[in-house]
């Protein structure tokens, strides 16, 4: 017989995970009673352990869905909170502490919540039962409690005592039954007393005749009857409970002693139901009957629900199967694919261009520092209509000064740490490309995977960094001593130097134009004129100009200084550009005269050599190892839970997975119900056949 209950409880548990409730569940036994009616004591007597939260303040703020599972062959007794994943808890005082914590986690102003705590207890000493413990009804609201508490508890209980649940209404014998809140509530929803079991606790506190009277109550007759109990844990057994031992037998012994001391009232002739053991049997029997009675309705509800889930799966997801694993595998594949595509388009030519651009900037700055480091007035005191080169130092190829100047500039370029610089630039580019690939992949919605991918990339790049930069540095070593330049290299360098200067000039003009637009042409001209006069010493600035000067605000002066800087820079750039374009610079022989071109050629040689090694040491290595590293970090290393968590980060995927899970669960439950009905049919056969 009990196999059925067990299986039905199993089904109920699965249905709970599908959620929603309503007809999509199987009935349970709902335990209600006033505070101090002895409700906890009854539940603990059934379980055989003290495990419910105690205390003067109301501690039960959430329903406890208690599933008892009889494990006849097991020795150990333990509890599990399936939603918390804490594993098996054999220490019942720890279960008690956890329940207290879970209750206290409900904010005081919320009083109570209908979000249930699920607790399963496995023991050879418990019957298969499904019980829901609710907060006890209160008569008067305590000093520190919110006014609405009383009503909130009543509402919560009302929600649970609806059909088809069985109501276990607890009342204490020493309180007039007419005043029992539990019975009053139950009567409202079950007026004919068809699904209520009355439990009268504290039978030892009234005299036996009065006790017997209560049990045969006629004012609110219950089809399932009243059971009288004495659930107080005897003093001596309190010790057991503290040592974790089962106290059922101690309670039963104590209880039996009381009832057998009054054979007249409670003996077999009285036909009154008394004792915790009787109560347990009644509960098992009633639950089985009730669950079995609901099975057909529940089955129909499941069939309908399943149809809806199947329809949603078809219409919204085109029956496309999906699992967290397959989603991860597909995402990873497509990411690797896009990475491969990127790698095919980012090779030596691209690295070369990247690197050359960085070195171009270095050359620009270096020349500005070594050659063009004086105010433009000193470099070309006369106007630009004149040939500025006429005013530029004549760089005599035989002059040691000009030779040294160029050698020093070249040395600074070759010794600036090209190995490190080049490796840094390329590694940073790879890392930023990986970031871009992530942003346009499914991983964009998955912070966990993003981190894993970024870490995979940086770990490979970091691993390769020092050896690559050393290698590159070694290979450019010859250029630190001597540099041979061919004619064709010179013309290419001349072209490039011109191009770089031009684009720099354009940027400079652009910035100047922006200032002009922001301030106005005339105003900017005025403030620049003022700054020029200050610089020439025609005007003396009082203080540092932070409070404004010459009728200009300090902000305006600041902008003016920027504009003057940009104008001077543009002038110098124009001059450099003219030098590069000049006839003299067409010829390699005039290299001391044309450092812009010479250094461009050097930068180009450095770039070509560096690229050769970067390609082998960094790029190829990265392209080979990165996909493998991804497989390890996002494939093999993840546990089932992590994969699940990963997939659920994306709301769309979560919904898709949920529909499938719901469908699977409902199918599973349905098949379980079908096999249960067969089992039931077979169980009935011999009797009908006889
Ligand atoms: P709850 O607030 O309804 O959960 O009530 P408890 O189970 O905590 O019981 C309230 C008080 O009544 C406790 O001090 C129990 O020890 C005591 N109590 C419970 N059942 C019995 C009983 O059958 N007989 C006696 N004498 N006391 C009981």
Image (cartoon, rainbow, N blue to C red):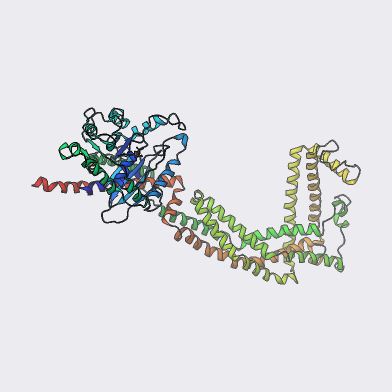
Where is residue 633 shown, x and y percent of the image? Answer: 49, 59
Furthest residue toward left: 690
Q: In which quarter of the image is residue 221?
A: top left
Total labels drawn = 0
Query: Which residue is found at the position 22% from the left and 35% from the top?
Result: 225
Viewer-side residue, 148 vs 174: 174
Query: Which residue is found at the position 59% from the left and 55% from the top?
Result: 432
Q: In this view, does 219 lie above or below 438?
A: above
Q: In this view, does 183 lie to the left or right of 52?
A: left
Q: Quadrant of residue 201?
A: top left
Query: Which residue is found at the position 88% from the left and 43% from the top?
Result: 533
| Ligand 1 in which quarter | top left
Where is residue 159 shown, x and y percent of the image? Answer: 34, 33
Q: Quadrant of residue 394?
A: bottom right
**Residue 460 visible in rendering:** yes
Q: Is residue 611 above or below residue 563?
A: below
Viewer-side residue, 187 vs 606: 187
Viewer-side residue, 339 vs 308: 308
Q: Is residue 51 left or right of residue 224?
A: right
Where is residue 99 shown, x and y percent of the image? Answer: 40, 44
Where is residue 304 shown, x and y percent of the image? Answer: 29, 39
Query: Which residue is found at the position 16% from the left and 49% from the top?
Result: 682
**Residue 581 visible in rendering:** no
């Amino acid at each position: 017989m009990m196999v059925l209950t067990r299986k039905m409880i199993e089904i109920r548990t699965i249905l709970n995970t599908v959620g929603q409730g309503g007809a999509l569940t199987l009935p349970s036994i709902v335990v209600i009673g006033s505070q101090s009616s002895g409700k906890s004591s009854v539940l603990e007597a059934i379980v055989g352990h003290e495990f419910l939260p105690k205390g003067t303040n109301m501690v039960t703020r959430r329903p406890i869905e208690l599933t008892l599972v009889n494990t006849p062959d097991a020795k150990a007794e333990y509890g599990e909170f399936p939603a918390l994943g804490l594993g098996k808890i054999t220490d019942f005082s720890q279960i008690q502490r956890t329940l207290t914590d879970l209750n206290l986690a409900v904010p005081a102003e919320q009083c109570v919540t209908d979000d249930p705590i699920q607790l399963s207890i496995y023991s050879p000493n418990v019957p298969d039962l499904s019980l829901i413990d609710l907060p006890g009804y209160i008569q008067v609201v305590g000093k520190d409690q919110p006014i609405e508490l009383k009503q909130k508890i009543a509402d919560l209980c009302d929600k649970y005592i609806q059909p088809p649940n069985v109501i276990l209404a607890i009342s204490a014998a020493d309180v007039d039954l007419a005043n029992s809140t539990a019975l009053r509530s139950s009567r409202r929803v079950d007026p004919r007393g068809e699904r209520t079991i009355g439990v009268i606790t504290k039978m030892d506190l009234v005299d036996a005749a009065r006790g017997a009277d209560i049990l045969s109550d006629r004012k609110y007759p219950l089809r399932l009857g009243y059971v009288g109990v004495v659930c107080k844990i005897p003093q001596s057994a309190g010790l057991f409970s503290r040592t974790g031992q089962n106290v059922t037998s101690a309670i039963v012994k104590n209880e039996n002693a009381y009832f057998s001391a009054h054979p007249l009232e409670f003996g077999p002739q009285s036909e009154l139901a008394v004792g915790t053991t009787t109560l347990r049997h009644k509960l098992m029997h009633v639950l089985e009957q009730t669950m079995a009675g609901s099975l057909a309705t529940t089955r129909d509800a499941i069939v309908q629900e399943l149809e809806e889930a199947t329809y949603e799966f078809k219409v919204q997801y085109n029956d496309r199967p999906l699992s967290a694993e397959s989603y991860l595998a597909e995402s990873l594949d497509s990411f690797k694919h896009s990475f491969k595509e990127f790698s095919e388009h980012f090779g030596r030519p691209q690295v070369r261009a990247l690197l050359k651009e960085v070195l171009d900037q270095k050359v620009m700055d270096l020349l500005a520092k070594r050659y063009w480091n004086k105010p433009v007035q000193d470099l070309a005191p006369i106007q630009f209509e004149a040939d500025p080169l006429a005013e530029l130092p004549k760089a005599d190829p035989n002059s040691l000064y000009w030779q040294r100047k160029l050698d020093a500039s070249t040395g600074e370029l070759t010794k600036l740490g090209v190995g490190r610089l080049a490796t840094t630039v390329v590694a940073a580019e790879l890392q930023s490309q990986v970031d871009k690939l992530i942003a346009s992949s499914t991983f964009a919605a998955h912070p966990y995977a993003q981190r894993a991918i970024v870490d995979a990339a940086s770990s490979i790049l970091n691993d390769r960094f020092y050896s690559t930069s050393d290698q590159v540095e070694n290979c450019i070593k010859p250029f630190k001593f001597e540099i041979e330049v061919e004619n064709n290299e010179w013309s290419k360098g001349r072209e490039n130097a011109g191009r770089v200067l031009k684009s720099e000039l354009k940027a400079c003009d652009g910035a100047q134009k922006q200032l002009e637009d922001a301030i106005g042409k005339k105003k900017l001209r005025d403030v620049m004129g003022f700054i020029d006069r200050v610089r020439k010493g025609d005007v003396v600035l009082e203080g540092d100009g932070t409070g404004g000067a010459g009728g200009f605000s300090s902000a305006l002066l600041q902008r003016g200084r920027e504009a003057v800087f940009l104008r001077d820079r543009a002038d110098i750039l124009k001059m450099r550009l003219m030098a590069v374009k000049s006839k003299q610079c067409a010829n390699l022989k005039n290299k001391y005269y044309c450092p812009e071109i010479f250094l461009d050629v050097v930068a180009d040689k450095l770039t070509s050599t560096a690229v050769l090694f970067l390609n082998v040491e960094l790029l190829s290595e990265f392209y080979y190892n990165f996909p493998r590293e991804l497989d390890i970090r996002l494939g093999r290393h993840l546990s089932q839970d992590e994969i699940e968590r990963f997939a659920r980060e994306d709301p769309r995927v979560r919904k898709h997975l949920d529909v499938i899970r719901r469908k699977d669960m409902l199918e599973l439950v349905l098949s379980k119900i079908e096999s249960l009905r067969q089992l039931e049919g077979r169980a009935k056969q011999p009797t009908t056949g006889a």
